[in-house]
Image (cartoon, rainbow, N blue to C red):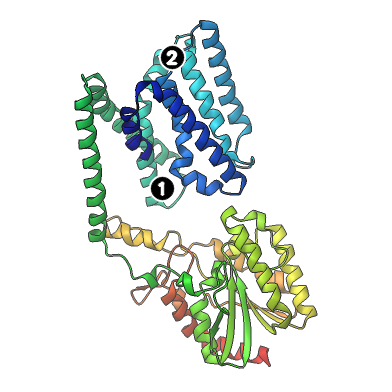
Amino acid sequence: MQFYLFMPFVLLGAPARWRAPGIAVLLVLLSSLAAVKSANGGDTAIYYALWARIPEFLFGAFIAVVPGPPTRSLARIGGIAGAGAIIASFIWLDESVPQARTLALIPCAGCAAVIWGGLRQTLHLLSLPMLVTVGNYSYSLYLWHWPVLAYLKYYYNDYSLSLPLIVVSFAIMAVTSYISYRWVETPLRKASWNLRLKWRVFAVIFACAAVMATAARALNSHIVAPLPAPLTRYAAPEVICHGRVVEDCIRGDLAGNGEVLMIGDSHAAQLNYFADIVGAFIHARIRVITASSCVDIAGFDVDRIPPESRVACREQIERVEKYLPSAHTIILAARWDYQLPSAAFVEALEQFFRRAQERGQHVFVMAQVPSLNINLQRAVRLEALGLRQDVQANHEWRRWNDALPALIRPFPNVTLLDFTNIPLFKTVPFWQGIPIYSDSDHLNEEGSRLYAEAVKASLGPILIDAMK
């Protein structure tokens, strides 16, 4: 959408003789920058960056401003080569291929070659009436497919829609595409334009877009007031050692004599305020060092987690290793339904337990808190729109919690702490009308504090005894 907002102004403002070379230079330059960024592990950033996605569209813009093939033979070669590039991409190209985001330009170039070759109408297959009709509607379908699918996936909280929903979504897309093609795209295409009128129309469209964007922002805040920040996060990111180190990472009683080391992924990070209350209750310091998607122990299979989390994961593992030799008591928390399916992680975890046993350390494994069937923030907004969602705990988390006892049984120095049956979790995601989750599986700040208050009387003596 951003490309189609700005590109008309670029084309109108550039002299005709500079359009083809200008587009070619932009295509090569931005593609090269994207390739360099991708080679340095920036695939996710490339996927969302406007500048990195522009080359995919520039292929089409380039075809629109250059002459067609001079001969039928050359047109046929271009069409066959382009079709080959598209077919090869279907077979060979997926997200497991290095620099897959950059290599997505191959099918783009293939499409451009097919279109270029078809300018002399040598590709009879693509001239079939049914395919021509689909081609005529393709731009409107392109514009409408995303809002339709995005809404349904948002409402049902699932990236994979059921077959009935897929059928419904295609029906909606077909109707909306026909309307926009018939009464918007076709009249504008057939209208007589001069340069002055074009600029006026583009100015009106740009102004309407700006008004709509501003109105949408204002409307959103009136539909449902934003929740206070402590209810939308598990901790203020600038004060916790999650993916980085902030000061000494100490929570709880800063003047306490005993010290506990708490490590793990974001399910340990959500316990920072939990650690404050429990640490104050037992008069102990609790050092909390965590990383996103990463249980920061030696041997963790870092390559399994999202690329943007890997550097911080490795750094936090190194930091935890510095504190492990002197740690007497360790608390380990994680999203077990994400971590335990990995055999490599289980092997690293068992090795961690063995090393702790050799050092005479006691390890407490925290069971995963209940997960929800929908993101809580999403449910609050949908309810404000009159689209009520049934929010409840799912069952996947419980299955992997139930696998923990067998995993830790061979290690007498490891104890499972499972508080998931306390009253606090009987009415998730709320407690006495207050949201205690920040999303579908993390407690928010208030939830973390309430969790600590609910279990400190039971957990406190256990930790005190372990620290003796």
Tally of marks? 2
The residue positioned 40% from the left and 20% from the top of the image is 65
Q: Position of residue 262 (x, y in %)?
A: 61, 77
Residue 67 tag number:
2
Q: Residues within 10 Å of mark 2 (few under 14, many from 20)?
A: few
Q: Amino acid at mark 2?
A: Pro
Up-down relation of residue 432 to residue 17 (above or below): below
Earlier along the polypeptide chain: callout 2 or callout 1? 2
Q: Position of residue 25 (x, y in %)?
A: 48, 30
Q: Residues within 10 Å of mark 1 (few under 14, many from 20)?
A: some
Kindly state the secondary structure of the residue where label 2 is placed: loop
Q: Image quadrant of residue 405? A: bottom right
Kindly state the secondary structure of the residue where label 1 is placed: helix
Q: Position of residue 99 (x, y in %)?
A: 61, 41
Q: Amino acid at mark 1?
A: Lys
The residue positioned 20% from the left and 26% from the top of the image is 196
Up-down relation of residue 176 to residue 424 (above or below): above
For discs 2 and 1, the disc positioned in front in the rendered view: 2
The residue positioned 56% from the left and 55% from the top of the image is 308
The quarter in which the C terminus is drawn is bottom right
Q: Is residue 141 left or right of residue 341?
A: left
